Amino acid sequence: MPVGYISIGSNIDPQKNIPSSLVAMEKYLSKLIMSSLYESEAVSFKGDIFHNVLVGFESQLEVTAMAKQLREIELAHGRTRNSQKFSARTLDLDLVLYGDLIFHQQGLQIPRDDIERYAFVLEPLAEIAPTLQHPVLKKNYAEYMGSF
């Protein structure tokens, strides 16, 4: 069974939206492990502080079905399909890793390059999966965090 990781972010009512998204994800995922809560400034726009966590999981779903379920959870939490990339969010669920899969199709990128670009993704990943190796970079996340 693949082990995947989802980055969760919210800067609109995060105390409600993040826990609610975890409850919704439990329908599709098992063996959830969650990082500590991280706070980060809004990127490329002025807005409230984002609350971020990273969740590890196991699932029987294939990658595109998983991405579809995450989009449905976002929509159920008030996110709209026409949201701007850099804007306030009720909920942002990004599948950043799915086992050692390398996948670039249908608007889905696994591993997600956010791992290499944003501390709010890499730091919680290094926290809960420090010895896991990036499928492309071939460095574990603790090492990569040390050089970030």
Image (spheres, grey):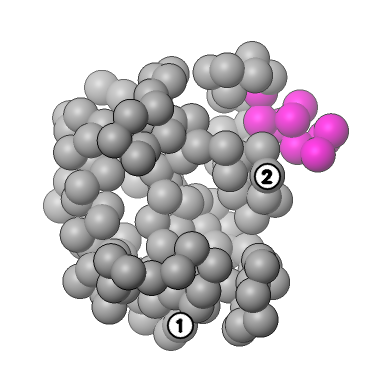
Front residue (pair 112, 134): 112
Residue at the spot x=31%, y=24% of the render?
A: 2
Q: List the residue tagged with mark 1.
A: 12
Residue found at x 59% / y 49%: 121
* Vertical order, 42 against 133 (above or below): below
Name the amino acid type tagged 1.
Ile
Q: Which residues are magenta?
A: 140-148
Total numbered labels: 2
**Predominant SS of the magenta segment:** helix
Residue sitting at the far right: 147
The secondary element bearing badge 2 is classed as helix
* Residue 133 is at least partly visible in this image: no
Q: Give yes or no for residue 107 being in the magenta stretch.
A: no
In the rendered structure, find residue 117 and report the number of the disc placed on it.
2
Disc 2 marks which amino acid? Arg
- Residue 20 relative to residue 11: left or right: left
- For the point 20% across and 47% down, the residue is 68
Q: Secondary structure at mark 1?
A: loop
Quarter of the image where one finds residue 16: bottom left
Do we see residue 28 in this rendering?
Answer: yes
User: Which one is earlier in the sequence, the residue at label 1 or at label 2?
Assistant: 1
Q: Nearer the viewer, residue 82 or 46?
A: 82
x, y percent for residue 80 = 29, 72
The residue sitting at 74% across, 30% down in the picture is: 144
Residue 38 in the image: state x and y as whole percent: 63, 63
x and y percent of residue 27 in the render?
15, 52
State how far apart marks 1 and 2 are (Cα): 23 Å
